[in-house]
Image: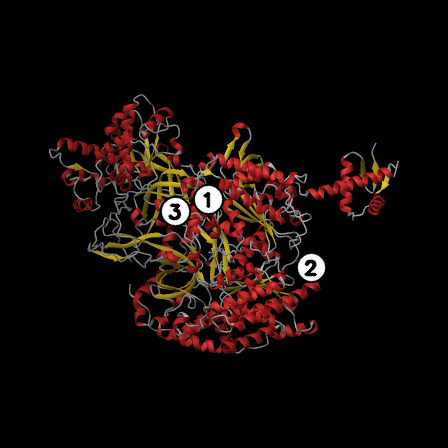
Amino acid sequence: MPSTHDWINNPLGVVPSLNDVPLHYLKPNSLVKFRCLIQDMFDPEFYMGVYETVDPSTKAKVLRCGKYKDVTECGVDFNSRNTVTAERQTFYCVPIPGENPWVKDISSSCHSSRVVPSTSYVPSRQKRSYEEDDDMDDMDTHPTEQHGNGDCKRLETEAPSSQMTPASHLDLNFPLPGEKGPSCLVKVYEDWDSFKLNDTLEVYGILSVSPALSALADEKDASSSLLDPAECMETAEEQRVHSPPASLVPRLHMLYAKTLPHNNPLLPSAPLEDNSAFLSSTLSEMASVRAELLTYLTHVLLGDALAAEYLILHLISNVYTRRDVLPLGKFTLNLSGCPTVASYTERFYQIIQQLVPCSYYLGMSLQNMNQMRLVPKKDYVANRLVSGALQLARNTSLFLDETQLEQGQLDTTGVRNVTALGNLISWQKVDYDFNYHQMEFPCNINVLIASEGRSLLPSDCQIHLQPQVGPATMEEYLSSIHMHPQASSQLNKLRIYLSVARLLDYSISDEMTKSVEDDFVDMRKDDPQSISAEDLHRMLVVARLLSLSLGQTSLSRDSWLRAKHIEALRRSRMEQHKCVNGNEP
Amino acid sequence: MSSPTSTPGGRKRGRNANPSTPSSEGPTSPPSQRRRGQDSSTGDLMPMPTSPATDMLSPSAPQDTSLFSIQSNLFLPNEVDMSSPLMYGTPSSRVEGTPRSGVRGTPARQRPDLGSVRKAPQVDLQSDADGAVASEPNAGQKLVIWGTDVNVGTCKEKFQRFLQRFIDPTSNEDENAGLDLNEPLYMQKLEEISVVGDPVLNVNCRHIQSFDAELYRQLISYPQEVIPTFDMAVNELFFERFPDSILEYQIQVRPYNALKTRNMRSLNPEDIDQLITISGMVIRTSQLIPEMQEAFFQCQVCAFSTRVEVDRGRIAEPAVCRNCNTTHSLALVHNRSAFSDKQMIKIQESPEDMPAGQTPHTTIVYAHNDLVDKVQPGDRVNITGIYRAVPMRVNPRQSNVKSVYKTHIDAIHFRKTDERRLHGLDEEAEQKLFTEDRVQTLKELAAKPDVYERLSSALAPSIYEHEDIKKGILLQLFGGTRKDFSQTGRGSFRAEVNILLCGDPGTSKSQLLQYVYNLVPRGQYTSGKGSSAVGLTAYVMKDPETRQLVLQTGALVLSDNGICCIDEFDKMSDNTRSVLHEVMEQQTLSIAKAGIICQLNARTAVLAAANPVESQWNPKKTTIENIQLPHTLLSRFDLIFLMLDPQDEAYDRRLAHHLVSLYYQSEEQMEEEFLDMAVLRDYIAYARTYINPRLSEEASQALIEAYVDMRKIGSGRGMVSAYPRQLESLIRLAEAHAKVRFSEKVETIDVEEAKRLHREALKQSATDPRTGFVDISILTTGMSATARKRKEEVAQALKKLIQAKGKTPAMKYQQLLEDLRGQSETAITKELFDEALRALADEDYLTVTGKTVRLLA
């Protein structure tokens, strides 16, 4: 195994990433990293941890290690008593769903600029290329004379035999439609119970794309004999899913993995507490960046500053804990009164896309609701979890466009989808469909609903948009929104701001607790109808998010008053709107 | 099909309990693994006659070392010529030569569940060993089966002793029903076999363990060797006892309930080739697979025939005919080969066993012979079997192989865990095993005087106050005692407590429902808005695979023995709601659909939440008017609570404190204050399973008094304030409260609390807003007594008016209304007028057609 330890010569920072570098540029058996989401967990498998090989000519026995490998060396002695069976677990991992282009660009640019000269990408397996990536040209400008080694050559000669399944036939099971990128079978050797479904990880591991794997699979299809118990226990579908050709779904043998608290490449990857310099510099800028963001969002929201304020709170919200069934910290925003002209909601989403690392736009058209698969479902034939659009990484922004909804009938799937969305919003959980039963998976997704009237889905907070732009000039104004160019350094500031604000700790002092209680009692005394327990819940969340948005890690009197103030403004606007419409329940 | 193999590919013999084995795994990976595997018979047998002495072990020698000595001495390189059947005689000679001759006449049936070729060499080995012991002078040493520490003779003896002596007086398994518990259990079972003729003996491993721990250990570790020994032992014993009985084939022993492994997740390489029991759910079953057991070859030249046993899915085709010595002249004759049934079953972890946030594991199980088609997808089963790992086949064309094993379980015994539901009893008793410690903790908790308060405050701690509602729900979780009066024709009494919560939106009703749904094992959560009648009951659909009609059960049936939480009860369509009538009193569901007519059990407690029709609760209206539900349904709820804002300063302060602390206290702090959800869950499960309180004399008296009192309250004002249904509710609540205390007797304090709670609920929901009195008729007839009185008055006034008009057979509707309005001093609404007309119509005094009112007679 010659090339396995090449990385030792390189610092760990320049480990090539499967996310950015096309598979055929990576050397087999080299160290790579992969930023991914655990989409499915397969059954644990037993493998030969230690085995002995016999050289047919010399009869010499050699003890070998089977860890971090898919395929054994030649001449395995199955009867050796030195064989040790060990156990490992396989995760099916996909790139983080809904990852926005800017995240991809930034993380790949900070790699390839450094990586390309130092590492040798041998484009030897180019003809098996699956995806046509743009970076490819980029890579080709740095061809390397240094040709890998014998191993590579051997692979090349074997390559055609392994190319049997056309890419299009294989469903890579991405949660969101239209996603690209490699998916990976990650083999986990230790502590696999500590990983959970939908965790986002950065996996460092040994890439295994041995064509022998595919050849083995191929072989089995052809000569599937009834008598071998190993053959008939798997259906063809299962076979396809669990041992797809390595050229499409590479194997990654995990050496080390870390859970990503965020997916923002602009932030240092170490936890914030360990990086006080970064933290303090960001915190000091927080207020000014916030003002900037507010101006920008006000502009986007047609001059409505209050809505912009709430949008900021929404964008930094995060389920930080759960009390029995109650998720705390979620802040689903329903932005009602969205203009339906000039595809405003789509433009609006594009702007959000520029700000958050992961997001997804779900147009709630009847067709979508009746046809899309939102909830993941277990397919027992292929023995895998068929993904759905609600299988998202934590803190993904889900943009529900209700303005797309027209009159019509929801069928069974539609009702189920709407119920799933409702559950997601109210309890931050998705009930995955396991056919015979359902299983509840907690999630942490920021849901933003854009609608004309009040949304049919529940929400934590509804705000009616009050455009400061007249309907006549609306079209013109809307088309100018995008023309507002943001310098990328400026944008990056906003992106850092939103991610940091979400990661901050927060507390309420005893003193503030007391004062909040007093406030509540007073408000109730004046008019018991004016504020309910639910309202207090919301005010506490608003106060929390408001403090965090200002970079304050504990609740201050000012923030509390400000939270009360904007809540009052919002409520009065709701009242007003109710009077106008008269049809609000 | 038949490929001549000289190397058994699947052979793998790595026995290394040896600590010096280079182990590259981390600390979590399982220790090196003991592997005897699907070793070939000849490999085992070869040394036997030549070197029996190496096999002799002193039984006192420590097992490990002795095994090693054998191993090192006996390990043979794999160059044994397997193609020669002469190694252990012709197949036909095998059966006769065995010690089974005592049971001659009954054919032995192969046990593919134990590995296809294991049996014959096993027996041969035994006869050889016996002979060896007899002839060898050194009788002080004992023979063991190669690679194990099992001595066949001792093992057999021990098992026979077990069968003859084992008595389990405390047995409460349903399959032992009808047996005399003070007689040897398994001898009775053998007798049963002789009568019924079903040659299967199920043996509970726990019995073996309590009888002889060493035997149990051997059974678990070497099932492949020990079970055939058991088979021999039981057959000898059986035919000794019942020499005349005729069985289809010899008795097979099926051990179950091996305590080795309970959970699929904990299976690891150490379990390979051991007897394990795991629980899970069947998710897929394959078609029947005919598996060749014995291949029949015929020589094309001389028509000489020979049989070859299948070894790990391979047939060693004889290269030379033994009769005419022609090479490669033998052809396989399918029709005369022996096949056995086999089925692949996929099992998935039960959802209860799973850690949160992970997907369930699946395991493949092979069922053989009569175990085929014993289970269906969806069944919950406990499977006892041998865990196997099959290495990937070596392919001559491939130099390197995938280093992964395929694992499966060869099933020996299935036990459906939900089968008992058919018998109608709690199956939780079996599933939920409480450890001694846990029971102790629970009992300590129960002994505390304030256990009731403690538990109710532990319920949904994130929801503030509403103490009585939580207490009500707590009692609902425990439920009453199930009573059966079907003997006397009354049918069974409902034991479940139904609760309805109504109140303003945003008073955390849904949250309470979610909490309950998450707490109970058999909970279902539906929303009235999204559920249809079929979704609640059951529907018939065509299975896409089998094209058969199958009954899919809905929420109510699924929550049998649990709680069905129905949110937005008021939004439910009338049609849907009507199915609840049967469920909520009779606790059954009748279905007549697509030719399927049946009655399903739906012994579910209903916890429903309803919002007032006008979005805000109108205190000037009755409950019925506020939520607009039919009173027939309302009267089926034992407790109806209103969740309203109390609007009081002290309450507000406590509420605010509670909420704020929710947002800043850490998880640990919260947990200190409240009981753990898991404890609560266990407490409830334990009480539901083991505590069945009965009414004591005083309690019955107290109940009677309470009922009479309730009746009295109303009778003073000429109305009925309680019905027998209320008495039943009281009994249920009192029983539930006794369960909370872990008391087998319902006592006066239980009745007091039931009364109090019932009164509280009534006070909230059945107060007549017009008079301020509690009036049960609001809930039972949908109308308060005063309202009814008023209706009668109006009807009388109207009658008088009509009579005063003299002989006019027909009147205009509108005219009459105006006349009545003019006459009456109180406002007459149109509704009131209509009702009065209807009342008179009921008396056959008049009839209303369209806009005219005609007098009759």
The answer to whether dots 1 and 2 both sit on one chain is no
Cα separation, mark 1 vs mark 2, equals: 48 Å
The answer to whether dots 2 and 3 both sit on one chain is no
Residue A315 visible to an observer of this rendering:
no
Q: Chain of mark 3?
A: B
Determine which of the numbered discs, if any, sits on residue B740 in the image: 1
The amino acid type found where label 3 is placed reads Glu
**Quadrant of image for the N terminus of chain B:** top left
- Horizontal and vertical percent position of residue A327: 50, 59
Cα separation, mark 2 vs mark 3, equals: 57 Å
- Horizontal and vertical percent position of residue A543: 53, 68
In terms of sequence position, does the residue under pointer 3 or pointer 1 come before the other? 3
Check the image and name the residue furthest to the left. Answer: B137
Mark 3 sits on what residue? B444
The residue at the point 32 percent across, 59 percent down is A68
The amino acid type found where label 2 is placed reads Asn
- Residue A369 figure quarter: bottom right
